[in-house]
Amino acid sequence: MSSHEPKIGNALADAAQKRTTAPDVHDHDHDEHEHTFDRWEAARIVFVGLAAIAVWFRLWEPFATVSVIGVAGVLVGGWPIFREAAENIFAQRMTMELSMSIALIAAAAIGEFFTALIITLFVLIAEVLEGMTVTRGRTAIRDLLDFLPRSATVRRGGSIAEVDASELVVDDAILVNPGGRVPVDGVVLSGHSFLDQSRITGESMPVEATAGAPVYAGSINQSGALEIRAERLGRDTSYGKIIEAVEQSERSRAPVQRLADQLAGYLVYFALAAAVVTWLMTRDMRSTISVIIVAGACGIAAGTPLAILGAIGRAARLGAIIKGGLYLETLGRVDTVVVDKTGTLTFGRPEVQHVFPVEGIKPEEVLEAAATAEIRSEHPLGQAIVTYAKAQGLTIAEPDHFDYTPGRGIAATLANAMLLVGNRALMTDHHVDVPASLTERLVAASEVYVARNGQLLGAIAVADTVRPEARAAVDALAALGLRTILLTGDSQPVAKNVADHLGIAEYEADLLPEDKHRKVAALVAAGRIVSMLGDGINDAPALTAASVGVAMGSGTDVARESADMVLLGNDLSRFVDTLVIARRTRNIIWFNFGGTIVVDVIGVVLASLGLLNPLAAAFIHVASEMAFILNSARLLPPIDRQRPATHPPVALLEH
Ligand SMILES: Nc1ncnc2c1ncn2[C@@H]1O[C@H](COP(=O)(O)OP(=O)(O)OP(=O)(O)O)[C@@H](O)[C@H]1O
Ligand SMILES: [Zn+2]
């Protein structure tokens, strides 16, 4: 009956607080409190049931005009409804409790105590069922919170100790046994094993972990013992971010949720107005009561937040962190997908293919100059050059100063030399001429020119590999009827090569970060709902301009912060999966809106014509609401079989 949505919020707030203050103390009081509450609820239902039987058989009727048991039953059974109705009047909100109270009082007033009691019974039972469904949603979240281990085995100063997870610090050496769960983000110090990271990246294949490999909190160690060094703890881990996103989505109400509450309010007004008309036309109190009772709206009031929570939780399981219900909603309406190339369609791990020096320069000179400028670079191209130079056995000097222009490249100084490494635009900026004959040699490779003191030294051909899963993802986007556009800072031939390879019809190359931003903003201004996927610093402005900006997980922090959604793995097909979830959520919510209106209108019409008695009306109300809430509940992630045994399964039914 009532909107249960605030209860979800409380649970999350509770859980969030537990996590920040004492992450590993399990809150049993809370469960117990709810447990006793439940007993009262059960007692109330039994009492109302017995009262209904007594009234039906006229067991004890000391007065001719009023049924004592009937009055008592309605007062006791209806108490939660009356109380909420009173609260709603004070808050000046139109809710079902209010109309239900009116109907109950009216039924009692005309001596229909049996009817009033059965309606009360329906309402109370529906409340319990609804509460159980919402609890399932809450459990799904608590599940997430409970998943990190509460204690860890640490090696400190030569001895090994079991410590509470809250006492871990960065750089601790943590031992994880086979079958154990990784408590922090970090790197493997020693050992060899396979890790199930499906919780964090959605990737179901176990990944191999050897010394130096990154590990993530929330992954399960499958085979060998591992020793890992902690790098990020608690809230800062990828897993912590997942939880935070789900919590945040709870706090920020999606616009569709507001719409649901409004619609629920209108339906109550509609039912009350129809009741007045019915009374005036027919003077039939039973029909009038039926009209008030038949219209239910909790299917949308409680079902909408439940659907959003379920969808965000489900997406989180895939490794897609949506930073709020608003973005989930927008994602369901996206019609245009803009992608960058590096890191999104390609691995973002390019390799040097060839070095082309100009006449009179040795290849090593080109490489050495480039590697010096790039040694501190975060850009994949820079890292490729440094790796290659090291593999060639070159010694790389530290530049005295370096300056990175996103979308162009790097200018660095070393002793008296001024080094430039970047694309044609960067060279033009510094009045360095690049002959076309050199450019022609860079077939389908990124343009990296190298100059020293205004003198071109040569070019380095660097090429990236297209992700195998990108093709299927691009096809899937097309199948969903989406327009896909590739925007890249890379050169025209590279862009064309990748676009052709993946079957992307629209692409633009040689774009600066501000160009990408402008293109995305123009699409949005033209009324398109745009999702932009990117990973680099050069994508950050465009991410903020998009309706839903999506950062790829392995990308830069800047991108992750600018984004409305983060894909923890770098798999584009997870984005497609998330889009499908978002669309499904939207469909379910709108189906519930439409369904509720249809059922309520038909019900009210039938009731006003005298075709529904109050009991049938109450049944329709409760049954239709439950149907719509269960429809929303389909979005909840499946109950996790791998969760630790801190919650026995029966706890599910107790709340
Ligand atoms: N650190 C760098 N070293 C050398 N060249 C660079 C560097 N940064 C940028 N460039 C040049 O500028 C171009 C554009 O770079 P930018 O980072 O905008 O895009 P990208 O990584 O090539 O592709 P995408 O836009 O798809 O991510 C690169 O292709 C390269 O030619
Ligand atoms: Zn209801």
Image: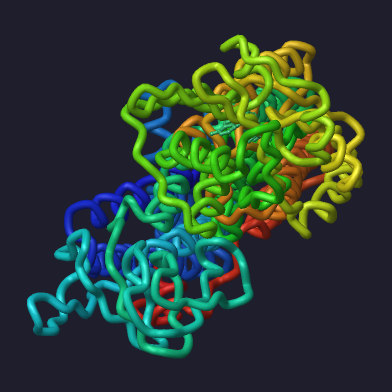
Residue at image position (38%, 32%) is: 86
- Looking at the image, which is closer to me, 506 or 61? 506
Q: Is residue 618 visible?
A: no
Q: In the shown orientation, is residue 518 left or right of residue 13? A: right
Q: Is residue 631 visible?
A: yes
Residue at image position (41%, 46%) is: 396
Q: In the shown orientation, is residue 5 left or right of residue 103? A: left
**In x, y percent, where is residue 276?**
68, 22
**In x, y percent, where is residue 591?**
78, 43
**In x, y percent, where is residue 550?**
61, 38
Residue at image position (77%, 58%) is: 469
Q: In the shown orientation, is residue 592 left or right of residue 245? A: right
Residue at image position (21%, 80%) is: 153
- Looking at the image, which is closer to me, 352 or 405? 352
- Give the residue at the far front of this rendering: 360
Location of residue 401 by image quarter: top left
Q: What colour scheme does the image use?
A: rainbow
- Looking at the image, which is closer to me, 242 or 326? 242
Q: In the shown orientation, is residue 468 left or right of residue 195? A: right
**616 w.r.t. 87: above or below:** below
**In x, y percent, where is residue 389?**
52, 51
